[in-house]
Each structure stands twice: as structure tokens, then as C-alpha cells.
Amino acid sequence: MKKMSISPPYSPELQNHLTGKHLLDFEIPFSQEILTEHLKNGYVSETCGVQSGNGSYHCVRCGNKDQTLFYTFPCKICNQDCTYCRSCIMMGRVSECAKLYRWTGPGIQYTIPDNVMRWTGTLSAGQQNASDCVIEAVNGKDEFLVWAV
């Protein structure tokens, strides 16, 4: 008899929040218990925000490798000299001791509606004229500027 493997349940809300992102813990509006359970079950991974190797730094969140955009400071969190990325500082400081979390569990299943990207409205005479001119320019591989609101 074949043994069935049943995956532990996961939070679709956490999945939606983390999919495609690297977030700091304060950016995740879920309890530490939920996050820890998802880490344990392999649905979420954590990594250091700034990684070092061969004498250089790399920011996991923004991908920065420009060494002039890293700064080392005496960190009160880890009580060591810690390096952070200045390239993405406006999103919150990511340093060597800061953990970034991302979704590594099942992918999100999307339902694509039948009439995706289909507009059923009508254009004004001016809009129709501009649309026709754009179509003509695209078909003729010409440049065309539409100045509109």
C-alpha cells in the first residue's frame, strides 16, 4: 500500500502577501507564530538582507552590487559592525543582520477571465482619429506622438 503524503496547510493570505517579494519582518502583517510555522513547513524562506563574499557585498532585496552604495555602522541589533545597502534604503534599512522573507511554497493559481483586456466602450471622434493614426503609424513602423490626458 502506497503512503500518501499530505502537505501541512498554509495561509493563502500570507502566500498572496509574500509572493514575488523579499520583505522585512515589520512589513509582514502576520503573527510571528504563523511566520515561524510557515518557515518550518518550507512555505517561507528567510535570508540575510545583505550578503558578503570575496570582500564585496550584495543586497538580496534590490540586487545592488555597487560597493560604494554599502555602509558599515555599529549595529545595536546584532551588537557588531553591520553593513547595509544604501541603494534601497528608502524601503527600510536592509543590513547583514536583517532577515528577508519570501514565499517558497506552492505558486498562486490564477483564473484568467475569457474577456481579458477587452474594452467594450466607445471613443469620441477625436479619440477615434488619434487611435486610427496610431494604428497607421504602428503598421507603417513610423514614429507617432499622441499628446493626451
Image (cartoon, rainbow, N blue to C red):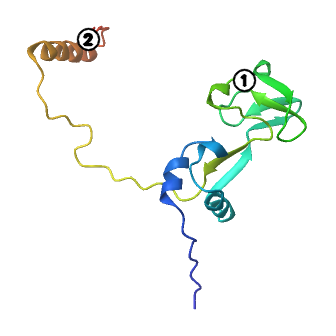
Q: Mark 1 points at which residue?
A: 86
Q: Indicate left or right for 143 with 135 as reference.
A: right
- In the displayed structure, 140 sits above or below 106; it is above
Residue 37, given in percent of the width and then of the height, sits at: 65, 64
Q: Which residue lies furthest to the bottom in this view?
A: 1
Q: Which of marks 1 and 2 is nearer the N terminus?
A: 1
Q: Number of numbered discs present? A: 2
Can residue 24 be seen?
no
Q: Quadrant of residue 144?
A: top left
Residue 118, given in percent of the width and then of the height, sits at: 21, 37
Residue found at x 79% / y 18%: 68
Q: Quadrant of residue 121?
A: top left
In depth, the one of 24 and 105 nearer the eye is: 24
Residue type at mark 1?
Answer: Arg
Can residue 25 be seen?
yes
Point out which mark residue 148 bears: 2
Quadrant of image for the C terminus: top left
Q: Dot 2, crowdedness within 10 Å: few (<14), some or many (≥20)?
A: few
Q: Nearer the viewer, mark 1 or mark 2?
A: 1
Residue found at x 84% / y 37%: 76
